[in-house]
Amino acid sequence: MHLRAPAILVSARSHGETAVIARLLTEDFGLVAGYVAGGRGRQLRPVLIPGNILDVELRGRGDSQLPSARLELKESRGPWIGEPLAAAAIGWVCALTATVVPERNPYPSLFSALSATLDAICHAPSARGWLRALVAYEALVLRELGYGGNQPGAEAELEALLEIFARHAAPLERYLLADRRGDVMAARAMLGERLERIRL
């Protein structure tokens, strides 16, 4: 395996003493995983933030091993990880993608929608500006994987968007996350709690 492509980092898991297993969503190759030597070091730690846009080069090391990954940062989500609501939203959409999207199946619409959702989260003035994009992304994930999903209307206000967000919880948990290890829904629950505060 040898590929080079723009990618969105959706998860980075420690491996051994210094390495990281990175999972990346690409437009043409879908979700791919790579071994990043020294990924926990000072130089690469800021690169391996979920949501970051990267140039990735993967080189296969044999059928039984993960390909090694070389990563170059193109756009960082680092400035937003200190903002609780934005960080929770980035964490949720990345965790959802890393957990439910099948590996090496291209989903170009998910790639472009995730990129747009992350841009909205990072650049809209408040959650009111990005919640529609996040809810639409959840609906697209459900639809692409065969389970429907409620798309928000163009004129949907905050209350309607929060209701759609609440309704998506059941199909996400029942159909996409029921047999997955790790409590990915906990990331969504935390986001939901933070979103409720903007109602007040």
Image (cartoon, rainbow, N blue to C red):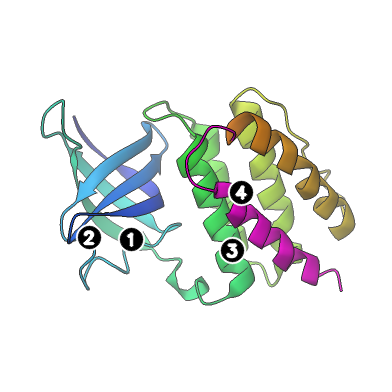
Q: Mark 1 points at which residue?
A: 48
The residue positioned 31% from the left and 49% from the top of the image is 22
Dots 2, 1 in contact, CB < 8 A: yes
Kind of residue at badge 3: Ala
Identify the residue position indicated by label 2 in the image: 39
Q: Residues within 10 Å of mark 3 (few under 14, many from 20)?
A: many
What residue sits 35% from the left and 60% below the top?
A: 74
Q: Residue 34, position in %: x, y? A: 25, 43
| Residue found at x 40% / y 51% | 11
* In the image, residue 154 above or below residue 91: above
Disc 2 marks which amino acid? Gly
The circle on residue 185 is: 4
Q: Which residue is tagged 3?
A: 88
Q: Is residue 40 left or right of residue 91?
A: left
- Going from the N terminus, do you reach mark 1 or mark 3 first? 1
| Front label number (4 vs 2) | 4
Q: What's the magenta bit mostly, secondary-structure-wise? A: helix
What quarter of the picture does the C terminus occupy? bottom right
Kindly identify the amino acid type of the residue bearing the numbered disc 1.
Leu
Place of residue 69 in the rendered image (x, y in percent of width and height, measured from the top left): 21, 47
**Bounds of the magenta span?**
178-200
